[in-house]
Amino acid sequence: MSAPLVEIDDVRKSFGGNVVLDELVLEIGAGFTGLIGPNGAGKTTCLNLISGYVRPTAGDVRVRGASVVGARPQDIAARGVARTFQTPRVVSALSALENVMLGGHRHHRRGHLAELFGLGSARRQEAAVRARAHELLDRFGLADQAQEPAAAFPIGSQKIIEVARGLVNEPHLLLLDEPAAGLGAEDVEALVGGLDGYLAGGTTAVVIIEHDLKLISRLCPRVAVLHFGRIIADGPPAEVLDDAVVVEAYLGAGFATDR
Ligand SMILES: Nc1ncnc2c1ncn2[C@@H]1O[C@H](COP(=O)(O)OP(=O)(O)O)[C@@H](O)[C@H]1O
Ligand SMILES: [Mg+2]
C-alpha cells in the first residue's frame, strides 16, 4: 500500500478549556472516506486541521508525508488540498463556470510540469481550466446553466458548484464538509454521480463529512465515526453502521436509523 495522503498523528485540539479532539489518530488514503458523527463531535475541526484553518494543540498533521502544522491555508491548498465549507461560498455575481474556474487559479496542479516551468502561455492555461470547469459542470448536470450567475442557483446547486471548484485543480485531497446537507434527492444524485464518475479508480483522496448515511454507504468503502473527539469505529459502512456503539452514539444525538 502506498503512503497515506493524510496522517493525523495523536492530535489534541482544545479551544480554551474545551477539548474537542483528543489523541486522534487517523490515516486517509486514496478514494472516498466518510467521516460521520453527531453534531459537535469535531468533524469540521478535523478538516480545519488538515486545511490549515486551525492549528493542533498537540500532535502532528501530515499531508503527503509533510507536516502542515503552522502552514497557511493557501500554502496547503497549493500542495494540492481542496475543500468546501458547510455553508457554500460562491461569488454571486460570477457565472457558475467562472466560479468553478476560480479553483484553477492556484499554484498547484497535478502533473503538467511544463506549466510549472512557465512554458505554457497564460492563455493556454486559462483555456485548459475552462475546459476542465466545463467538463465538471457537465458531470454534475449543470452544463446547460454554466453561464448563469451563481446567485440564480438554488443553494443545493451552489454547493455542487463549490464541489466542482474544489476539483478543477485536480487536487490530491478533497475535503467536503456536509456537501449533501440541504440538497434535494435529485441534487444528491447529481452530486454522487458526478463525484463517482469523475474520481472512480483514481488516486485522489476524498474525505466526506455527511449525515446522509445512504450517501456514505454508496460512495465510501470506508467510514470513520467521530464521537466526543475520538474515532470510535472505522471500517466498511455495512459493518460500522451496524455497530451497537455507533448506533448508540447516533441515537443519542437523535439520528434517524433508516438507511
Ligand atoms: N474556532 C473555534 N473556536 C471555538 N470553539 C470551536 C471552534 N471550532 C469548533 N469549536 C467547537 O468545537 C466543537 C466541535 O465543533 P465542530 O468541529 O464544528 O463539530 P462538528 O463539525 O462535528 O459538528 C464544538 O463544541 C465547537 O463549538
Ligand atoms: Mg461541522
Image: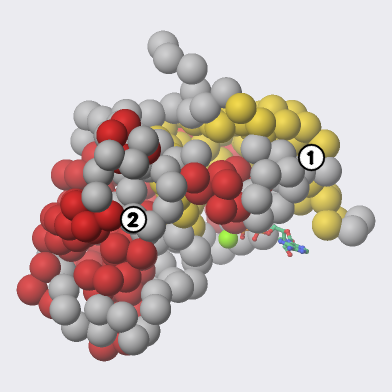
Image coordinates of residue 68 in percent, x first then y, are: 65, 37
Q: Quadrant of residue 9?
A: top right
**Mark 2 belongs to which amino acid?**
Gly
In the image, taking residue 98 as reference, residue 176 lies left or right, namely right
Please tell me in which quarter of the rendered image ligand 1 is found. bottom right
Q: Which mark is residue 62?
A: none
Specify the amino acid type for callout 1: Arg
User: How many C-alpha atoms fall within 10 Å of the one at disc 1: few (<14), some, or many (≥20)?
Assistant: many
Image height of 52 relative to 126, above or below: above
Q: Is 53 left or right of 136, judged from the image as shown? A: right
Q: Which of the two residues, 178 or 68, is positioned nearer the viewer here?
A: 68
Give the residue at mark 1: 12
Picture residue at 8% right of the left edge, 73% below the top: 144
Q: Determine if residue 246 is in view.
A: no
Q: Image height check: is 121 above or below 182?
A: above
Residue 158 seen from this side: yes
Vertical placement of 231 versus 72: above or below? above
User: Number of labelled discs?
Assistant: 2
Q: Secondary structure at mark 2?
A: loop
